């Protein structure tokens, strides 16, 4: 439907363009390398980001530890009236009401009229040492403040009474009961420098590692696909008329070896199917040619000598050959439908004993009141109902009876009963008093166009397809048709085992 719409130009052009694009390459090697490279890129990039984050946090923790030590040093220095630089991080010492006592040069652009940028301790209660706060510095144009301009930084602070710093508070208007706070900024410059150095290395290392993984995946896939390419080349030489080639099985005991074994098994089945098909076509042509040749010969002789011909006998002979052709054609068509897996007829409950009784009456009427078929239903009253397509089940019984009648001397016995050894299945047995079937031929007789007595069977009109059709139809209904072992000279016996009870799905011929 989608292709018809596309041909009719009913799909948008954008959809047609997207359908024509291939995002992934066509080659299996390229796709494998692409997938490995993508996975490696994701893995390496994730690892690089995690490493970068851990390095940044580690350096930032180190900077924070240095800031705490600087707070201790500044408090000690102010206690001895000896604040002097240089210090490791920007700092500011603020008294109550924001009075600036000391600061580093980085904070000078933010301080106005002797007042500090950061807040003073106020009149509140005491706070623990190394309290942390975050401050955002406004953007300024002074070169000295470029490292802090527009940044949000964390401070480490310590608060002490003003009396603890008499030298720094004298002459600044700081009351005796006031407090002084020391701020030290945690500037992430060291962490950013370390991360920057790591980034320069990772920008080169991650693509190189990804390319290495892609190359290894390419080479490994190429090496793994060599046996597959050999299998493809060998399989390409196989044709429908000569499927005798076999692929080489690599000595790897892996999936490729399993593929080679599967292909060889498939080729074997193809060869057997091709051989069976050729034999079937040849046999069918031979079977059709024989009645046609007989029919044409009789008609040509009668036409050449019309005055001498016994026209009733000619017409009767032509009718027999035509009926034989019709029966053979019908059986060939049925076999073709079975081989093609045509859907079976609907199944329903069928009383196998009643069906057998109707067929016995029909064969008796056909014999002109001198029946050659006897019916025996063992254990009267026992249920002999099976679930199958009535037409298929009737065809199975007719084929078995026709085969038995062609070989019987006097009588054919048809028995329908429940299996006492394994309750459930219904058994239908067809036995004749003819020459019987040798044990060596017990399975060969189910092959198509197989005749154990070529001359007599052709004279009687047998096609060699009846038993093959009967077994196929029985298998489609979950049944089984097998020959029973009989003593030599006691005739042939075929047993049809059909499941009874719950309905079973009809299975197509494999």
Image (spheres, rainbow, N blue to C red):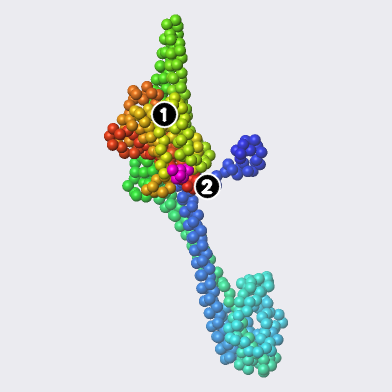
Q: Quadrant of the C terminus?
A: top left
Task: Please tell me which residue is depicted at 46% across the width and 22% down the height of the picture.
Answer: 323
In terms of depth relative to the viewer, which is nearer, 113 or 267?
A: 267
Instruction: Say above or below: 151 vs 355.
Output: below
The answer to which of marks 1 and 2 sits earlier in the sequence is 2
Q: Quadrant of residue 76?
A: bottom right
Q: Which mark is residue 153?
A: none
Q: Quadrant of residue 70?
A: bottom right
Instruction: Identify the residue at the far right of this view.
Output: 113
Query: Which region is colored magenta?
Result: 380-386
Queried whether the magenta region covers residue 382, the answer comes back as yes
Specify whether 137 is left or right of 47: right
Q: Which is the main secondary structure of the residues drawn in magenta? A: loop
Residue 249 location, x and y as percent?
34, 43
Q: Quadrant of residue 453?
A: top left
Residue 401 location, x and y as percent?
41, 32
- Whether residue 197 can be seen here: no
Label 1 crowding class (10 Å Cα cut-off): few <14, some 14-19, many 20+? Answer: some
Secondary structure found at label 1: loop
Instruction: Say above or below: 112 vs 283.
Output: below
Secondary structure found at label 2: loop
Task: Please tell me which residue is depicted at 55% across the width and 78% down the height of the picture.
Answer: 64
Q: Which residue is mark 1?
A: 371
Residue 153 location, x and y as percent?
62, 75
Q: Which residue is mark 2?
A: 24
Q: Quadrant of the N terminus?
A: top right
Specify whether 78 is left or right of 292: right
Specify whether 393 is left or right of 256: right
- Whether residue 493 can be seen here: yes
Task: Please tell me which residue is depicted at 44% across the width and 25% down the height of the picture.
Answer: 368
Residue 309 location, x and y as percent?
43, 8
């Amino acid at each position: 439907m989608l292709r018809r719409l596309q041909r009719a130009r009913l799909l948008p052009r954008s959809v047609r363009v997207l359908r024509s694009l291939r995002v992934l390459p066509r080659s299996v090697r390229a796709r494998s390398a692409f997938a490995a490279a993508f996975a490696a890129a994701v893995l390496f990039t994730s690892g690089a980001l995690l490493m970068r984050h851990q390095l940044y946090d580690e350096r930032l923790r180190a900077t924070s530890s240095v800031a705490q030590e600087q707070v201790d040093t500044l408090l000690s220095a102010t206690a001895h009236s000896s604040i002097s630089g240089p210090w490791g991080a920007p700092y500011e010492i603020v008294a109550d009401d924001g009075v600036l006592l000391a600061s580093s040069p980085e904070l000078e652009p933010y301080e106005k009229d002797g007042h500090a940028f950061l807040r003073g301790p106020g009149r509140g209660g005491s706070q623990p040492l190394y309290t942390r706060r975050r401050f955002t510095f406004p953007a300024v144009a002074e070169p000295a403040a470029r490292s802090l301009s527009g940044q949000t930084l964390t401070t480490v602070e310590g608060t002490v009474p003003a009396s603890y710093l008499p030298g720094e508070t004298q002459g600044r208007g700081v009351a005796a009961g006031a407090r002084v706070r020391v701020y030290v900024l945690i500037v992430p410059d060291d962490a950013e420098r370390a991360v920057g150095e790591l980034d320069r290395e990772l920008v080169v290392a991650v693509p190189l590692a990804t390319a290495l993984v892609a190359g290894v995946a390419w080479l490994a896939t190429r090496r793994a696909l060599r046996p597959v390419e050999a299998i493809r080349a060998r399989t390409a030489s196989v044709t429908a008329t000569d499927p005798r080639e076999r692929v080489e099985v690599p000595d790897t005991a892996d999936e490729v070896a399993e593929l080679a074994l599967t292909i060889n098994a498939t080729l074997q089945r193809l060869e057997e199917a091709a051989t069976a098909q050729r034999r079937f076509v040849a046999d069918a042509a031979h079977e059709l040619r024989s009645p046609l040749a007989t029919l044409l010969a009789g008609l040509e002789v009668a036409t050449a000598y019309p005055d001498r011909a016994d026209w009733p006998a000619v017409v009767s002979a032509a009718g027999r050959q035509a009926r034989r052709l019709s029966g053979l054609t019908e059986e060939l068509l049925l076999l073709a439908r079975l081989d093609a897996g045509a859907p079976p007829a609907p199944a329903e409950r069928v009383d196998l004993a009643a069906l057998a009784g109707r067929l016995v009456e029909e064969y008796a009427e056909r014999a002109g009141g001198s029946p050659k078929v006897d019916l025996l239903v063992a254990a009267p009253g026992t249920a002999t109902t099976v679930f199958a397509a009535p037409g298929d089940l009737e065809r199975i019984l007719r084929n078995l009876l026709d085969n038995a009648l062609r070989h019987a001397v006097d009588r054919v016995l048809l028995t329908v009963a429940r299996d006492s050894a394994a309750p459930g299945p219904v058994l239908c047995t067809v036995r004749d008093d003819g020459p019987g079937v040798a044990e060596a031929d017990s399975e060969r007789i189910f092959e198509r166009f197989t005749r154990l007595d070529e001359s007599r069977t052709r004279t009687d009109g047998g096609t060699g397809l009846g038993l093959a059709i009967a077994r196929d139809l029985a298998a489609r209904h979950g049944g089984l048709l097998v020959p029973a072992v009989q003593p030599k000279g006691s005739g042939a016996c075929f047993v049809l085992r059909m499941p009874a009870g719950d309905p079973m799905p009809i299975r197509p011929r494999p």
